[in-house]
Amino acid sequence: ISANLGAGYDVIDEDSSITSTYAGAPGAAFKTPGMDLEPWLARAGLGLSHTLPSGTEVSLRYDAEVRSDFTNQGASLKARWAF
């Protein structure tokens, strides 16, 4: 079993945006504003790993990052074996 817990601060803390154009009209650019996120964030994760009798290691992991009005979650399943 593994776990992690942490906090972070976005020192740059700038608004994000994406500038886009269409392939047929490169002169008609437009900007899409990103989310206005708080600079403080919290991270947490939990994992479970098990080695099978054959030597294969199987692990399952869940991680989350949270800010105000924003939650990023991820899960993974991994199998590792020597050959």
Image (cartoon, grey):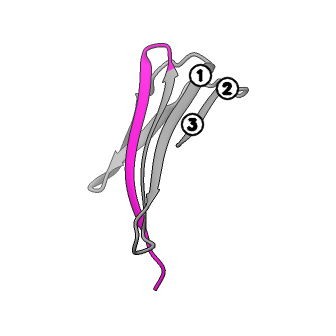
Q: Are marks 2 and 1 in contact (CB under 8 Å)?
A: yes
Eye-nearest disc, 1 or 3? 3
Range shown magenta: 67-83
Which residue bears the numbered disc 3?
3
User: In terms of secondary structure, where does tag 3 sit?
Assistant: strand
Which residue bears the numbered disc 2?
8
Which residue bears the numbered disc 1?
41
Is residue 71 a member of the stretch shown in magenta?
A: yes
- Between 44 and 10, the residue placed more toward the observer is 44
User: In terms of secondary structure, where does tag 1 sit?
Assistant: strand
At x 73%, y 26%, the residue is 11
Return the disc, 3 or 2, that comes first in the chain's sequence.
Answer: 3
Q: Position of residue 18 (x, y in %)?
A: 45, 37
Q: Crowding near pointer 2: few (<14 within 10 Å), some, many (20+)?
A: few
> On screen, 55 above or below 64?
below
Return the disc, 2 or 1, that comes first in the chain's sequence.
Answer: 2
At x 42%, y 70%, the residue is 56
Return the disc, 1 or 3, that comes first in the chain's sequence.
Answer: 3
Q: Position of residue 47 (x, y in %)?
A: 48, 43
Looking at numbered disc 3 in the image, what kind of residue is underneath it?
Ala
Is residue 3 a member of the stretch shown in magenta?
A: no
Instruction: Spot the residue most to the bottom.
Output: 83
Q: Crowding near pointer 3: few (<14 within 10 Å), some, many (20+)?
A: few
Looking at numbered disc 2 in the image, what kind of residue is underneath it?
Gly
Rounded to the nearest angstrom, the CA distance separating label 3 from label 2 is: 17 Å
